[in-house]
Image (tube, rainbow, N blue to C red):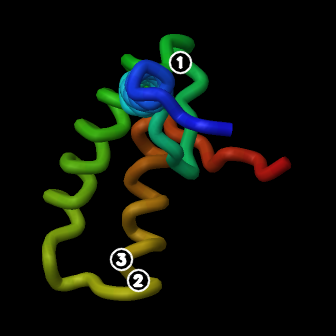
Amino acid sequence: MRLTPSSVHLCLIRLCLVGLLALSLGGCLPKSKAWTHPGEPNPRKEDRLFEEDTQFCEGKIGPQAEGPARDAAMADCLKRLGWKPKVKD
C-alpha cells in the first residue's frame, strides 16, 4: 500500500483533531480529591470551595506542623468546615 500526500495530510489532520479533543476534555474533568462537601451539589463550586477552605486551613495550621500531625490537623479543620472524607469504592 502506497501512501499519497493527501492520505498523509488526512491522517495528520485526524491525529491533530484527536489531540485537540483530548486536551479540551482534559480541562473539563473534575479534580480528584479525597473530600466531599454534602452542602454543595455543584462539582465546580465544590472544587472552588475546597481550594478556599484548604488555604484557610493551611493558614490556621501554620508551617510548624509536619507529617502525620499536619494531616490530622488539616482533616480536623476540613471536618469543622463541613467536609467529609470520600468513601472509597
Q: Position of residue 41 (x, y in %)?
A: 55, 13
Neighbourhood count class around disc 2 (C-alpha, 10 Å): few under 14, some 14–19, many 20 upward:
few
Secondary structure type for disc 2: helix
For this rendering, which residue is in front, 77 or 85? Answer: 85
Above or below: residue 7 compared with residue 72: above
Position of 38 compared to 69: left or right?
A: right
Q: CA distance from mark 1 to mark 2?
A: 27 Å
> Which residue: 43% across, 73% down?
71
> Which residue: 39% across, 27% down?
5
Image quadrant in which the N terminus is located: top right
Q: CA distance from mark 3 to mark 2?
A: 4 Å
Question: Residue 67 is drawn in which quadrant?
Answer: bottom left
Above or below: residue 15 compared with residue 34: above
Q: Position of residue 44 (x, y in %)?
A: 40, 19
> Which residue: 36% across, 37% down?
50
Neighbourhood count class around disc 3 (C-alpha, 10 Å): few under 14, some 14–19, many 20 upward:
some
Give residue 70's mark. 3
For this rendering, which residue is in front, 10 or 30? Answer: 10
The reply to whether the C-beta atoms of the residues labelled 3 and 2 are less than 8 Å apart is: yes
Q: Is residue 22 visible?
A: no
Question: Residue 36 is drawn in which quadrant?
Answer: top right
> Which residue: 49% across, 12% down?
42
Q: Can you identify the residue that label 2 sits on?
A: 69
Secondary structure type for disc 1: loop
Position of 58 compared to 79: left or right?
A: left
Q: Position of residue 69 (x, y in %)?
A: 41, 83
Neighbourhood count class around disc 1 (C-alpha, 10 Å): few under 14, some 14–19, many 20 upward:
few
